[in-house]
Amino acid sequence: MTKKISSLQRSLNFNNEKLQLLMNLRMVVGLIIFVLFFAASLSKWNYIYFSLSLFFTFAFIILIPLTSQRKLFIQKLTQLIEFYKRMNSRKKGLYKAEDIDINSYPSHVQTLAQDLHITGHHSIFNLIDETLTSQGRKALLKKILMPNMNKEEIIDEQNLIKELNKSYWPLIKLRVANLGQKNSDLDETINEVKRPLVTHRFHLLLSIHYILFALVWTLVTLSLTGTIPLNPIFVFTLYLLFSLATRAQVAHSFRRAHGLSSQLLQLLPIIRFIENQNGKSLFKKYFKHSLQLKLHNKLKKLQLWMAFLSVEGHPMVHIVLNALCPWDYTLTYLVEKWRSQIAAELPSVIDEISYFEVLMSQTLFYHFLTSNFPSFSDNKSFSCKNLIHPLISQEIVVGNDFNLPIGKQIILITGSNMSGKSTFLRAFGVNQVLALCGCPVFADQFETHLAPLRTCLKVQDSLEQGLSTFYYEVRQVAGMVNAAKNRENFIFLIDEIFRGTNNRERLIGSKAVIHELLQYSVFGIISTHDLELTQLESTENKLVNFHFRDDMGKDELVFNYKIQAGPCPTTNALKIIAKEGIPVDIA
């Protein structure tokens, strides 16, 4: 990807040079035209002056669109470079962007987002997000945090992503062309479409306009044929005065129509792309309202009406047209009729557009970052090969292979500090989230079952709620136990269970939680430093021990970050303390 960025940068530099040449040439041509006119005015216009002035004026006119086209191309090229830089940064696990608000979600979902870095500046959400509107952004967030548990629809989504990936370059062009539209508020657009553009008096005044229009042209025709002695200009002037007197009824409608059209016409490229997929069965299933409404043709018609209405910006032309016919009233009627025809269907189409933005983000994620889709088992099993965490650079991250032994329900992971326990929990959790929302995962193979996550990984106190670190953790774990008692299906992840209290009470509390969770049909992973907990494997046949470990090298600790069966045989806390210069007996 670095080579691609370098190639695009060279192209950008080349086009910037060409643009500068065009601008310099246009300035020179303009100066020559000025000199020619100045010289001709001092002497006398002749054939040579006229021919040269005509030639250079024509050249200047040609240079204007050429310069504009080059500027537009440079703008898109710049945005394309930014797109590839973004993808390259994501691949290295370095990409950061603005955070997104999740305060409207349930507390356990907010905890999940915090624990797994689903939201935040450096997050899973920002790893995927290539949406175009605020609605698309919200739809993507909801899909990640509260995914669909329908296996058939997830498989359909995987197939849609594969299908869209065949057209990945048009998707990139669509994304690049719409940079800067993220703040578009489609909810406001829907509300505008539902509200009539005209008042209740409009249709009465429209009828009067058409009656007067027919009368005016009848009188004009009679005056032109000499039937009656009447000045046509007088008749047109009277009709113009009536038009101006009643224009207040359409002026507000025009402003609203202009705003509405500006919002809707931004969707034209997306609508065109969706409608071009009309022959594909999955698109017919998930985009039926967009394909039935044929909004692309309707938007082109709206574009035409708005082009006609835009003559308001040319006062003389506008006055003449309204003197000859009910120009403003007719076009306002056509725009209002257009609005009423799409008002009922547009909310469903907007929802489908938001869904398409989500699919587009997932497809670009699939194309640039990982293309391995998970599989889903009907029983509560889990296995993976080369499982990694996507927020760690793929150049340095260590992958893990794992298979949940048959009949086991809780994985207890022990291990020394910094050996990889927390990263493994988060890697599993993140990839489970990606699997449930239809995305590919960061593993060569990933088999899981359909179940949402509950987590207690990033324990912290809360000054706002007056909660200590320990009490915060107890509440999170208690929420899991209560959800299990309510027969909810979920996967739990607990990192360093009850770390906030003393050894004795931590051990007793941890045993109680494990025993309680084993009574219900839930699966999960718990990490701990308490090696005493590993003895539960002998009494709880649904619990199994795994560990991460370190080895002491010549001068430092060595970690392989690989999960291994059984309880951890090593500890390193005292070694770390001693390594930092604190005198401690490690014998």
Image: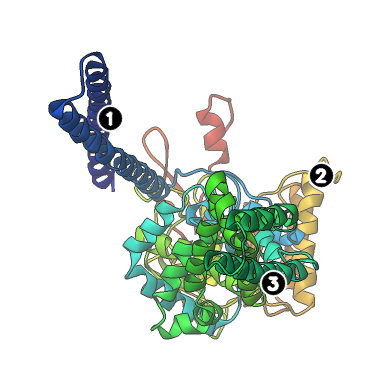
Instruction: Identify the residue at image location x=51%, y=50%.
Output: 570
Can you see residue 124? Answer: yes
Neighbor class of circle 3 (other Cα within 10 Å; few <14, some 14-19, many 20+) is few
Q: Which residue is mark 1?
A: 23
Q: Is residue 193 above or below residue 185?
A: below
Q: Amino acid at mark 1?
A: Met
**Location of residue 406 in the rendering, given as x and y in whole percent from the top left corner:** 52, 81
Q: Is residue 23 above or below residue 205?
A: above
Q: Position of residue 128 (x, y in %)?
A: 49, 57
**Precedes in sequence: disc 3 or disc 1:** 1
Q: Looking at numbered disc 2 in the image, what kind of residue is underneath it? A: Ser
* Image spot of residue 344 (x, y percent): 67, 77
Q: Earlier in the sequence, mark 3 or mark 2?
A: 3
Nearest the viewer among 138 and 170 is: 170
Q: Which residue is mark 2?
A: 468
Q: What residue does disc 3 label?
A: 211
Please give left or right for residue 304 compared with residue 141 in the image: left
Is residue 335 visible in the rendered structure shown here? Answer: no
